[in-house]
């Protein structure tokens, strides 16, 4: 509005200047009879800043603005979907990251024989801690320690009196915790032996079960019998009946091993819960995995029928060994894998943190029934063990030809479920050492086989330096199996570790006491002598292990056979074409083609088969990745 002064000098209010842009829609300067334009028609030539929503919508619907916008939108959607599809495809086709249990060999420590720290002649946990540098030198990250639970030692720790305690022979729980902390500090993983099948007859559960305590009465497998008449013909692994009469309870209890190792009743849910609680106990302390012992014996048929004899004509009273029976009712029973899968599920709850994966391996000697062993891998939907131990290479001493070696390797590779991870064992605390069973000539070629096949190798302590069995006399026998039959004693492969040429091979440098004799060759076969000698077994083992972990073809490469005959077993490890290395074991090669990495005395050819084995590692481009290692 505005003010206008009249001629008389008074001031008068009049309407403001007319501005159509700020007038109401019904206000117009047009004459009443003039035609009105439709409300939807907008005469502004170009959009302007601050235009109202109605004007913006009017322009946005025009083709020149709408079409580019829609093109950009659908182009963005298409690119996003393509990126998602490519990402999903790469993830689906790419192999998963390898776990710690796949990258490093597993090294078995037999604690009684590894290192004695207190001078009592028996190895202990502090002794293992003292020698952690040995694993670093070998580039080994996964350590499996055989049992150190509180035990009467009737079977050297496999008869457990208390699953939650350390036997004083090996130290204290504090010693264990310090060892575990030091191992983790050095990037090492600890795998414990776990024994779910049985306990010691001194265990609190068994003593309460004997007196028929209402809670523990069915913790073990009991059957009616008397001192002379057993429930059936079942035979223990150590020989003679698997039943022992207990006068306190007036029944027989089952033991598939020693009579001091009564079998737990794994059909009892309370027993399974006790075992799971023990698993939680050790996992909560930080243990990285378990080796489940003797799992195929965990369940027995409830009907308790006689097992069929291998020789039906043999008098029943002469059936005294495990080889006399077909173990249809005492091994691999229905429900066994459900129990192991239950254990696995409990372990998985501890594997969720990055780098904290908990590993599980099962032990089951199934011999020619390899399909039973493969069942421990689990199913595509239900996880069980990461792998069952592969013991078939333990049969190498039966025949040292290349054809036999290929047969044993193919036995596992051709039966293993698709997508699973293989493993290889050539020695343990139950079997003779390589150097004694096959011969010193073959130690390095078998170590090469172990470290270049696909999967995880397992090395028994001392095999990295080529230790041999010791000779044991009847009065030196410690093994209960050997006391039953001297020829079956496992003491020879359990002799003290040979660290150096000092007293007791460095195993016990405080007193002149060892629980088993030291091998007389310890001055020349020991860690100190071999670690820096390029021609030694240990140097070769270390080199091959480092090569295995640094060259992707050995960890992820394809595996295929090249040649196998009486003298040769060769195979190929390849990754993405001809850049990967090949590996093989061969005998007959022209001398001018041999490229020895060390001067090692040529042994007499007294054996047929590999004879004078030569190790080959070379690239497919004919450029040597590793020269021949000639024994």
Image (cartoon, rainbow, N blue to C red):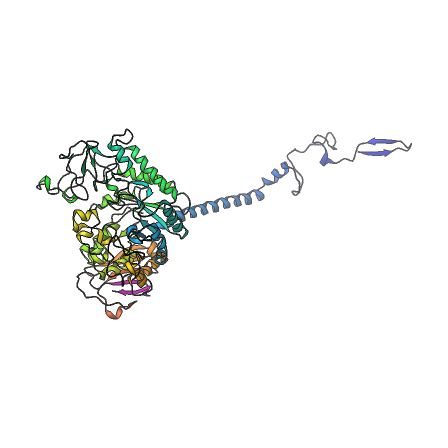
Residue for point 16% across, 48% down: 485
Image side of residue 93 versus residue 423, left or right: right
The region drawn magenta spans: 609-631
Image side of residue 66 versus residue 323, left or right: right
Taking the view exactly as shown, the residue that stands out farthest to the right is 8
**Residue 314, relative to residue 464: is it above or below?**
above
Q: In the rendered structure, does residue 623 fall within the stretch colored magenta?
A: yes
Taking the view exactly as shown, the residue that stands out farthest to the bottom is 592
Q: Is residue 576 visible?
A: no
Q: Is residue 555 visible?
A: yes
Counting from the top left corner in percent of width and height, residue 585 is at 25, 60
Instruction: Please identify the quarter of the rendering in which residue 619 is found.
Output: bottom left
Residue for point 29% across, 35% down: 271
Instruction: Please identify the quarter of the rendering in which residue 199 is found.
Output: top left
Q: Nearer the viewer, residue 48 or 545?
A: 545
Q: Nearer the viewer, residue 334 or 301?
A: 301
**Residue 258, relative to residue 515: is it above or below?**
above
Counting from the top left corner in percent of width and height, residue 152 is at 26, 43
Counting from the top left corner in percent of width and height, residue 126 is at 35, 51
Counting from the top left corner in percent of width and height, residue 139 is at 36, 57
Image side of residue 305 versus residue 40, left or right: left
């Amino acid at each position: 509005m505005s003010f206008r002064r009249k001629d008389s000098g008074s001031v008068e209010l009049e309407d403001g200047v007319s501005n159509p842009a700020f007038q109401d829609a019904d206000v117009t300067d047009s004459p009443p009879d003039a035609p009105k334009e439709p409300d939807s028609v907008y005469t502004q030539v170009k959009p302007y800043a601050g235009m109202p929503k109605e004007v913006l919508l009017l322009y946005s619907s025009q083709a020149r603005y709408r079409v580019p916008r829609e093109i950009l939108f659908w182009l963005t959607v298409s690119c996003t979907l393509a990126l998602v599809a490519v990402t999903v495809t790469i993830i689906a086709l790419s192999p998963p990251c390898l776990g710690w249990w796949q990258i490093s060999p597993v090294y078995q420590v037999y604690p009684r024989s590894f290192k004695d720290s207190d001078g009592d002649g028996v190895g202990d946990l502090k002794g293992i801690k003292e020698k952690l540098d040995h694993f670093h030198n070998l580039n080994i990250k996964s350590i499996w320690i055989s049992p150190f639970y509180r035990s009467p030692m009737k079977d050297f720790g496999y008869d457990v009196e208390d699953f939650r305690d350390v036997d004083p022979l090996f130290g204290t729980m504090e010693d264990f915790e310090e060892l575990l902390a030091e191992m983790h500090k050095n990037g090492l993983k600890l795998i414990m032996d776990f024994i779910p099948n049985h306990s010691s007859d001194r265990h609190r559960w068994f003593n309460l079960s004997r007196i028929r305590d209402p809670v523990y009465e069915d913790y073990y497998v009991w059957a009616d019998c008397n001192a002379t008449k057993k429930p059936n013909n079942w035979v223990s692994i150590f020989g003679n009946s698997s039943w022992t009469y207990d006068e306190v309870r007036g029944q027989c209890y089952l033991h598939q091993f020693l009579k001091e190792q009564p079998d737990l009743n794994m059909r009892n849910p309370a027993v399974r819960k006790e075992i799971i609680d023990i698993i939680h106990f050790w996992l909560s302390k930080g243990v990285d995995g378990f080796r489940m012992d003797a799992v195929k014996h965990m369940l027995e048929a409830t009907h308790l029928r006689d097992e069929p004899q291998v020789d039906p004509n043999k008098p029943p009273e002469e059936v005294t060994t495990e080889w006399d029976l077909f173990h249809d009712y005492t091994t691999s029973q229905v429900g066994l894998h459900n129990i192991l899968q239950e254990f696995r599920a409990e372990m998985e709850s501890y594997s969720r943190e990055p780098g904290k994966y908990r590993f599980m391996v099962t032990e089951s000697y199934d011999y020619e029934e390899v399909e039973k062993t493969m069942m421990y891998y689990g199913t595509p939907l239900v996880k069980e063990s990461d792998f069952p131990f592969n013991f078939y290479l333990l049969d190498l001493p039966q025949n040292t030809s290349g054809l036999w070696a290929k047969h044993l390797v193919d036995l596992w590779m051709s039966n293993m479920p698709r997508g699973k991870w293989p493993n290889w064992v050539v020695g343990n605390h139950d079997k003779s050492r390589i150097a004694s069973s096959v011969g010193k000539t073959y130690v390095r070629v078998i170590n090469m086989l172990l470290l270049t096949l696909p999967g995880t190798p397992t090395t028994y302590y001392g095999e990295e330096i080529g230790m041999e069995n010791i000779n044991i006399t009847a009065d030196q026998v410690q093994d209960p199996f050997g006391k039953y039959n001297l020829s079956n004693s496992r003491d020879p492969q359990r002799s003290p570790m040979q660290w150096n040429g000092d007293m007791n091979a460095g195993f016990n440098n405080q007193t002149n006491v060892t629980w088993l004799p030291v091998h007389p060759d310890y001055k020349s076969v020991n860690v100190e002598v071999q670690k820096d000698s390029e021609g030694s077994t240990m140097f070769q083992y270390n080199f091959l292990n480092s090569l295995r972990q640094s060259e992707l073809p050995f960890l992820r490469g394809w595996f295929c056979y090249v040649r196998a005959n009486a003298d040769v077993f060769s195979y190929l490890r390849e990754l993405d074409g001809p850049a990967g290395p090949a590996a093989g074991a061969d005998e007959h090669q022209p001398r001018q083609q041999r490229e020895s990495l060390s001067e090692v005395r040529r042994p007499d050819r007294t054996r047929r088969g590999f004879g004078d084995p030569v190790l080959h590692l070379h690239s497919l481009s004919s450029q040597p990745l590793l020269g021949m290692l000639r024994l």
